[in-house]
Image: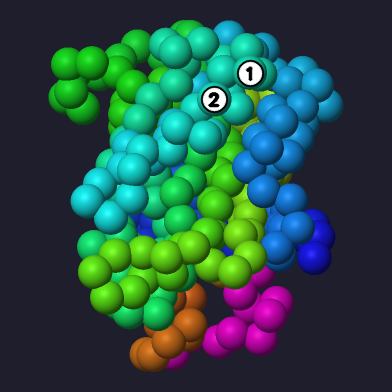
């Protein structure tokens, strides 16, 4: 009933997002699961202890988000009270609608088909003080702002409900699904908002710099990030037996290689040299 895992994961939805300071397609997902065993009152203190105790992240740089409720279910006051008991202040707790703080395969509660299971989430964000808010993302900065000041480092999903006619009902057993990206957690532990500055990417970026005679700075940062992420992701996919093709996983692999090649040409770099030297 209790599971912990670490698994290479790939998110095709994030391909177009790669190039900023925090999005990558391939990442190592750290997870813990409760299948009808522990629930909110155990999970939230444990993950808080992991981040603040084991990793030593400053408590004043951590923010949590909760589900604000809708016509199907009330706001998550139970998680709110737990966070408050752990010393998280109101100005570090933010409520969001289902699009941000609810999980099911189909989406928000109103999008769930009959029989679908899902539940509210509580996410943890790390705030980097040195990042200046860009008002093109809104007048006010907040944990889910896209300016890069905040970085999501963990998400506890409380799988407790099943969609029925006219609403939701509690499942016989309530479950926990926590996920946290190793690369993002490492960036937070380093207090560096650029996820590509972690050790995982330094050798790859160094090879790109040598091959292109460009520095990882300014206008060259975005294309170098795409090349580094996509080559790394493609390597893991090929190692799992995927080959480039025009459908399914093979199409995604081909798309990664094509996007990396385009950025390589923009940098006037030697793609063959990069792929040979930067991938262990």
Give me the residue at 75% from left, 58% from top: 37
CB of mark 1 within 8 Å of CB of mark 2? Answer: yes
Q: Can you say whether 252 is above or below 135 in the image?
A: below
Q: Quadrant of residue 110?
A: bottom left
Range of residues picked out in magenta: 236-245
| Position of 240 relative to 19 (above/below) | below
Crowding around mark 2 (Cα neighbors within 10 Å: few <14, some 14 to 19, many 20+) is few
Q: Quadrant of the N terminus?
A: bottom right
Which residue appears at 36% of the width and 71% of the height? 163
Residue position for label 1: 85
| Nearest the eye: 152 or 257 | 152
Q: Residue at x 63, y 55 (%)?
A: 176
Q: Which mark is residue 69?
A: none
Task: Tell me where residue 219 appears, x and y as whole percent.
Answer: 33, 31
The residue located at (43%, 70%) in the rendering is: 162
Indicate the quadrant where residue 95 lies: top left
Q: In this view of the protein, can residue 216 be seen by the observer?
A: no
Q: Looking at this view, is 126 or 197 the one in front?
A: 126
Q: Position of residue 267 (x, y in %)?
A: 39, 46
Viewer-proximal residue among 246 and 141: 141
Coordinates of residue 158 in the picture (x, y in percent): 55, 52
Task: Name the residue carrying label 2.
Answer: 81
Q: Secondary structure at mark 1?
A: helix
Q: Is residue 47 left or right of residue 169?
A: right
Q: Position of residue 148 (x, y in %)?
A: 39, 27
From the viewer's perspective, tell me whether residue 237 is left or right of residue 30. Answer: left
Q: Residues under labels 1 and 2: Cα distance?
A: 6 Å
As helix, strand or loop, the secondary structure at mark 2 comes to: helix
Query: Chief secondary structure of the magenta span?
Result: loop
Binning the other alpha carbons within 10 Å of mark 1 as few (below 14), some (14 to 19) or many (20 upward) gives: few
Whether residue 242 appears in magenta in the rendering, the answer is: yes
Residue 53 shows up from this direction: yes
């Amino acid at each position: 009933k209790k599971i912990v895992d670490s698994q290479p994961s790939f998110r095709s939805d994030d391909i177009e997002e790669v190039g900023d300071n925090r999005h990558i397609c391939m990442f190592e997902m750290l997870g813990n699961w409760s299948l009808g065993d522990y629930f909110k009152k155990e999970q939230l203190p444990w993950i808080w202890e992991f981040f603040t105790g084991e990793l030593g992240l400053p408590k004043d740089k951590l923010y949590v988000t909760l589900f604000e409720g809708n016509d199907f279910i009330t706001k998550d006051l139970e998680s709110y009270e737990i966070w408050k008991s752990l010393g998280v202040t109101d100005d570090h707790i933010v409520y969001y609608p289902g699009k941000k703080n609810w999980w099911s395969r189909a989406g928000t509660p109103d999008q769930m088909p009959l029989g679908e299971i899902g539940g509210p989430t509580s996410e943890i964000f790390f705030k980097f003080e040195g990042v200046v808010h860009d008002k093109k993302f809104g007048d006010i900065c907040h944990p889910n702002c896209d300016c890069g000041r905040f970085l999501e480092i963990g998400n506890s999903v409380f799988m407790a409900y099943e969609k029925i006619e006219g609403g939701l009902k509690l499942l016989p057993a309530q479950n926990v699904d926590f996920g946290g990206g190793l690369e993002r957690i490492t960036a937070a532990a380093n207090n560096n908002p650029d996820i590509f500055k972690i050790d995982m990417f330094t050798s790859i970026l160094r090879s790109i710099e040598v091959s292109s005679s460009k520095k990882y700075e300014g206008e060259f940062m975005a294309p170098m990030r795409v090349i580094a992420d996509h080559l790394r992701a493609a390597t893991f996919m090929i190692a799992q037996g995927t080959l480039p093709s025009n459908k399914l996983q093979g199409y995604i692999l081909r798309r990664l290689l094509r996007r990396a090649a385009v950025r390589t040409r923009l940098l006037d770099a030697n793609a063959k040299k990069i792929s040979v030297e930067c991938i262990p």
